[in-house]
Image (cartoon, rainbow, N blue to C red):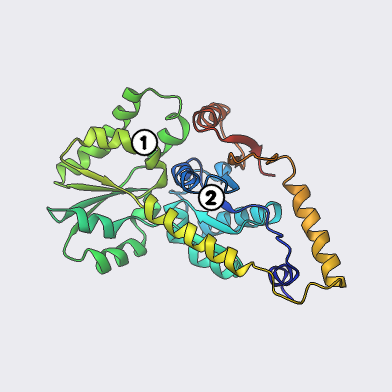
Amino acid sequence: MQKTLLMRCLGINFIMVDFAFIDSGTGGIPYLLHLKSLIPNAKCVYVGDTKNFPYGTKSSNEIVECVTCLVQKIIDKFDPKVFVVACNTMSVNALNSLRNSFPNKSFVGTVPAIKVAAEVTKKKIFGLLATEATVHSDYNFELKEKYANDCKMILRGDSDLIDFIERKSFTASDAEIKQACVPAVNFFKDNDCDVIILGCTHFLNISKQIQDVCGTQIKVVDSKEGVVKHAIEVYEQALRLAKPVEGVAEKTGAQVFAKKKLGECAERTRGLWSEGETSPALFITGFNDNEDKKEYDALSKKYNIRFCGNID
C-alpha cells in the first residue's frame, strides 16, 4: 500500500506542510504572499534554488535536473501537500517531467499570461518579458496559437533585469528600481506594444515600478491571480482526498509504521512553527555571493518571512 493511501486509511495526517513554493531565487515571493493573504493559516515553505541561479541561461535538460533534485529535497524534509512551481522557466521546461517523476504529488505551474494579454490588448500587439529560456520555449508559441493567433507577440529576454531584482532590488531605492526598468519598457514602447506580460516571476517583485515607468500607455499583466486560485483549488481537493476511510484504522503493523513516519516528519519540521505561528519559512540552496544574504535579510524583514538559511 502506498504511503499516502496508508495514512489516509489510518486517519493520520502525515503531511506537515501545506504548500511549498519553488523558484530559482526570489521570483515566487509575490505568489506566496498573495496565497497567504487568502489563506493566512496555511503552513508554507519557500525554497529558492539560489545555488543554481540563474535558470534562464540553462538548457532544458539542466533545468529538469536542477528542479528534480530540489523537489526531492523538499519532499524528504517537508512532504508538502502542493508544490507551486513559482517560476516560468521551471514550469515550461520541467513541469511535465516533475509530474511524471513524482506522480503522488500535486504541482501547480506558472506560465506567461498570454491569454490575459490577448484579452486586454487593443492594438493586438503585446510584449513578453521573460528569461531567455522562457521566451524561446515552444510552449509559449503554442499558447499564442491557442489564445492570441490574431496578435503580434514581441519577445524580450532580460537576464540583466532579473539579476538586478535578485541581487539588488530589495535594498535599492524606488528611483533605482525604476531606472533599471527603463531599457525593457522603452523596448516595448518602440515596438508599439500596449501590454507587457511579466513572463518571469522575478518581475512581479517590481511590478509597481514597471507599471509606473510604462505610464498609461502600456498595461502590465501577470499570472499571479490565476496561479494562486488554482493552487488553492488543488489544495482543497487534496484535503478532501485525505479524509480518513472508515473502519480500517485498527491497530496493525501498518498503523505502527504510519505513526513512526509521522513522528519522523514532525521531527524534521520541529521549530518551524510554534503554536499559533503562521509566517512562511524561507530557505535557499546556497549563496554565490556574500552580498546576496543582505537581499534576503531585507526581503524577510519587509514581508515578515522567517529566513531559515540553507535547506541542506
- Residue sitting nearer the eye, 180 or 35: 35
Compared with residue 245, is residue 120 higher up or lower down, i.e. above or below? above
> Residue 206, labelled with which disc?
1
Q: Residue furthest front?
A: 246
**Three-letter code for the amino acid on which mark 1 is drawn:** Ile
Q: Is residue 280 left or right of residue 121?
A: right
> Residue 61, labelled with which disc?
none
Q: Position of residue 201 (x, y in %)?
A: 41, 46
Q: Position of residue 41 (x, y in %)?
A: 57, 46
Secondary structure of the residue carrying tag 2 is: strand
> Residue 22, labelled with which disc?
2
User: Is there any visible trace of residue 59 in the rendered image?
Assistant: no
- Residue sitting nearer the eye, 232 or 3: 232
Q: Position of residue 223 (x, y in %)?
A: 36, 52
At label 1, counting other C-alpha atoms closer than 10 Å, the crowd grade (few under 14, some 14-19, many 20 or more) is: some
Q: Position of residue 312 (x, y in %)?
A: 70, 44
Compared with residue 210, is residue 67 higher up or lower down, i.e. above or below? below
Secondary structure of the residue carrying tag 1 is: helix
Q: Is residue 275 left or right of residue 137?
A: right
